[in-house]
Amino acid sequence: MPSVAKPSRVGSIARAEAYVDEGHFVSDLARRIAIRTESQALPASRAELERYIAGEMIPSFEKLGFVCRVFANPVAGQGPVLLATRIEDPKLPTVLGYGHGDVIAGQDGLWTKGKGPWHLDRDGDRLYGRGTADNKCQHTINMAALAAVLAERGGKLGFNAKYIIEMAEETGSAGLDEIVLANREAFAATVLIASDGPRATAGRPTIVLGNRGALTFDLVCKLREGGHHSGNWGGLLADPAIILAHAIASFVGPRGGLKLKAWLPPPIAANVRQALADVVIDGGENAPAPDPTWGEIGLTGPEKVYAWNSFAVLAMTAGNPQAPVNAIAPFARARCQLRYVVGTKVDDVLPALRRHLDTQNFKSVEIVALPEVARFEATRTDVDHPWAQWVMQSFARTSRTQPAVIPSSGGGVPNHLFQNGLGMPTIWVPHSYPGCSQHAPDEHILLPVARSALQLMAGLYWDLGEGGVPA
């Protein structure tokens, strides 16, 4: 009598590999890319956002034995939130996943690869289409890895699983906090293991334990109404653009280092430095090379972007740059942003700046808070947290290499909601790479990265069902 192969970790990973090798990954992703889920194009895109949930996500999760519940968004006009739940035994650990089905504007006429943003096209190892990297590919990978373990274990995961798919991430996750916090029990879990963003480098598995926060505000120097002839009044009237430039230079150095002590985070912890010691920032062939002389003196590149605070002027204007005239402008404005890590006294960021500007005699410069601009809170699961260490060990077992560990990513994700709102450790496993053209024309993923991501997640989900996870 022929022997029957015993369900195994190797078998789960083999099933995940077959999902890619036999073309199922490409066909599933192509179907999802074709749905034009531009959340920044509301209200025209509202029907497509709902179709992605009702016509694509719900049937796919129900095939995996999940019970689906859709929450209407409390923010008028925004897309819904799906919670898919599969409870095998209340005594087992519950893993919460997260993804988003909405995408930014397609920028249809600007693509140089394939047939445009709403058609998945392959060029060698690259798959082009809007949402490939952010985020349809990423939750497609995780769902397929769950399916591989279910098939290998004969219909069982060995743990409980919940999965969120939101449709408003690209508009700042509008409404998500309200939905989750009003339904804490429904969303409660032991740990968040989610996927978004890029790996540190394409060829190395990466674990992200949180994200830097972002506080955006305007600096405005308005001195008068209307412009005045620069020949007749130059040297007599104060120039708001010059005042604003010097005001910014008073708290940020000529190479981007922060001069305002109240904006500095605590010293970088030893375990964070150790985790970043072997991390390399490599955006790929189309990415700019980091400027080694920019930013905080004495820090490595990874420490600057993953463990320290940075300031940027996102936009700056005075007069009419498109059609300059010989006139001293009446006002100047700069859109500014501070990216900050855990431990920063964020509630004192703008008050401290006000005190500084007043002390430096820049009282004519106004600070304008921007409550309408999405603000991300800084979060971080400790590098030595048992769940972080457990995930690292699982990935090392699959890939036979130590994953890169990023304490705080540079991008904005709603991690605060899970870590602070629901009180769980959070681990993000990105399935894209830095050169993916995320948010730009020609967005794409690399097929080898997607295949390795499926291996990692199938191994991880298998290990979750084997027991021995952190308490």
Image (cartoon, rainbow, N blue to C red):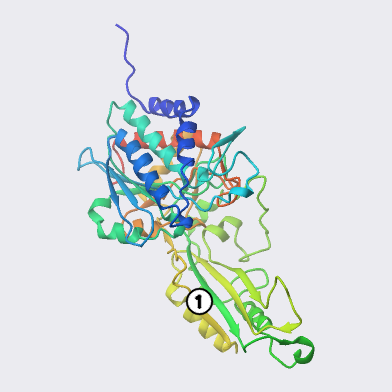
Q: Is residue 396 above or below residue 440?
A: above
Q: Quadrant of residue 43?
A: bottom left
Q: Residue placed farthest to the front in the image?
A: 44
Q: Residue placed farthest to the right in the image?
A: 231
Q: Secondary structure at mark 1?
A: helix
Name the residue at 40% across, 43% down.
Answer: 391
Q: Is residue 27 above or below residue 188?
A: above
Q: Position of residue 314 (x, y in %)?
A: 59, 67
Q: Position of residue 433 (x, y in %)?
A: 56, 45
Q: Position of residue 1 (x, y in %)?
A: 29, 6
Most foreground residue, 32 or 23? 32
Name the residue at 34% across, 17% down.
Answer: 5
Name the residue at 63% across, 66% down.
Answer: 297
**Dot 1: few (<14), some (14–19), or many (≥20) neighbours within 10 Å?**
some
Name the residue at 31% across, 55% down.
Answer: 72
Amino acid on which disc 1 is placed: Ala
Which residue is labeled 1 in the image? 262
Looking at the image, can residue 188 be seen? no
Q: Position of residue 336 (x, y in %)?
A: 56, 71
